[in-house]
Image (tube, rainbow, N blue to C red):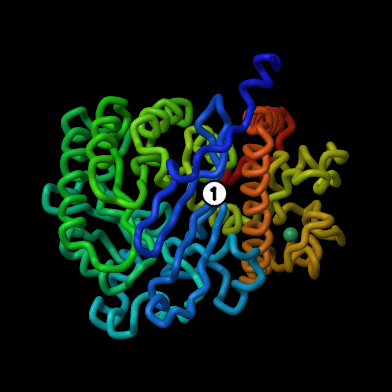
Amino acid sequence: MPPAEQRDNIIININEAAAQTQFQNMKFAVKTWCKSGRARVGLLQLKCTSLVQGATSPEIEIETPALLLTTRKGLPAFIPPDHLSFLPSPDSRLLQFSPMHFMEGPNSKTISDIGGVHQLLGLQGYGFVAVPRDSILSLPECSSSNKNGASFETPSGRFLVKPLEYMKMISSMKPDLWVSLADEVSASVTVKRNKASVDRTITWLDHCISLKPRDGALFGSVVGGCSVEERQRCAHEVAKRNVSGYYIGGFGLGDSIDERSTFLHAVTDVLPKEKPRQVCGLGLPEEVLQGVAAGIDLFDSTYIYHLTLEGFALIFPLNDKCKQYESDTQLCSMASDYTKINLKATVYRKDASRIVEGCECYTCQNHTKAYINHLLNVHEMLAQILLEIHNTHHYFSFFRLIREAITEGKFEEFRQKFIERRREHLLAPSLGACELQTSVR
Ligand SMILES: [Zn+2]
């Protein structure tokens, strides 16, 4: 009999027939999970909606936990379509967008006539995931939402979106996966407002189901703010509906990271295990690990966007890589917190080394830290392009390590080790000034 700690990490292979789900163009199967926890590895398979009829579409197969690439109007913020091939595949083939990004673009009929987002963007080999809210350009604005629709703050102004309008957008854009309209509220709302958000989200889900287009898998939204009871009530109701998966919303809106595990676990305890779960608002490495520990399968990549925008490059160790930073304590205290470095720092002005020695991304194969430091100092957008390629590459590798840790039965060990090392660096008294001037953690 193995010791208790080892027993906790025993991996069990579950009967796939009992833990898989299939809806039109989407299949999902849980492959393995730790016996002691909720962390799991799954396989998500998609057929691109736009090419199903022609039967020429290769299936997209992505192992979970996985990162969906957050986009602005269908493309990553700094990566043009011809640079998408520089990102690892198939990891980079799921693109998340908000229909609200197109509120001031071509109208629904025009997008529909063109053939949906795949044809509009010329990206047939990619899967598109439509989520009403994101954490960059389409933020829920709960004080203006009402029983008729949800309000969003966007660069083009504030929009109240009703379920019927939302469904017209979904029908015209033809995403492969889409999330039902939700009334996401901030952590500070009253008990009454929080309860109303759950009632509305369930009502709107029923509207979405009644108007559901033929193609595309529907993920039902689960909200409930900072109330375990409301989150479980919502999850129970959504679990009764005919949906392909679940979207757990309402995070990153003033809630505390310390309380989040309780709410995540309250929801995943209720949801059927065989269907995929997506979350929005968890981006930091610690938050991703928290979500994975609660049984979340799909995350967004707004963290990469914010890092890239502010000139940061991810550097935390991936196996034996990145040791260049561990041995340089002066560098760590000047411009690094163990997970990332600030390439705007003057310490990189004459640094002819790569961001991560051994990294296989286009940026590290071709350019030095000194060159990217120069590009940042002269405000050349190529800096963000190169940084986004590296950061996306690196964060995909982080997700691969998570999947490997779950498969090997070492997820809790991996999680604890990662968090402890980063905490040590974040609490270091000599943390550099460049680090303190930014909102990116
Ligand atoms: Zn790289």
Other residues around mark 1 within 10 Å, as few (<14) / some (14–19) / many (≥20): many
Image quarter of residue 375: bottom right
Residue 72 placement (x, y as % from top left): 44, 66
| Callout 1 amino acid | Thr
Residue 379 placement (x, y as % from top left): 63, 68
The residue that mark 1 highlights is 64
At x 64%, y 39%, the residue is: 407
Quadrant into which the N terminus falls: top right
At x 57%, y 39%, the residue is: 32
Image quarter of residue 408: top right
Residue 106 placement (x, y as % from top left): 30, 80
At x 19%, y 49%, the residue is: 144
Residue 3 placement (x, y as % from top left): 70, 14
Quadrant into which the C terminus falls: top right
Q: Is residue 57 visible?
A: yes
| Element type at mark 1 | strand
**In screen coordinates, is 432 left or right of 273?**
right
Question: Relative to residue 360, is residue 260 depicted above or below?
Answer: above
Question: Relative to residue 213, is residue 192 depicted above or below?
Answer: above
Q: Compare residues 346 and 352 and report the one nearer the observer.
A: 352
**In screen coordinates, is 432 left or right of 138?**
right
At x 22%, y 64%, the residue is: 167
Q: Quadrant of ligand 1?
A: bottom right
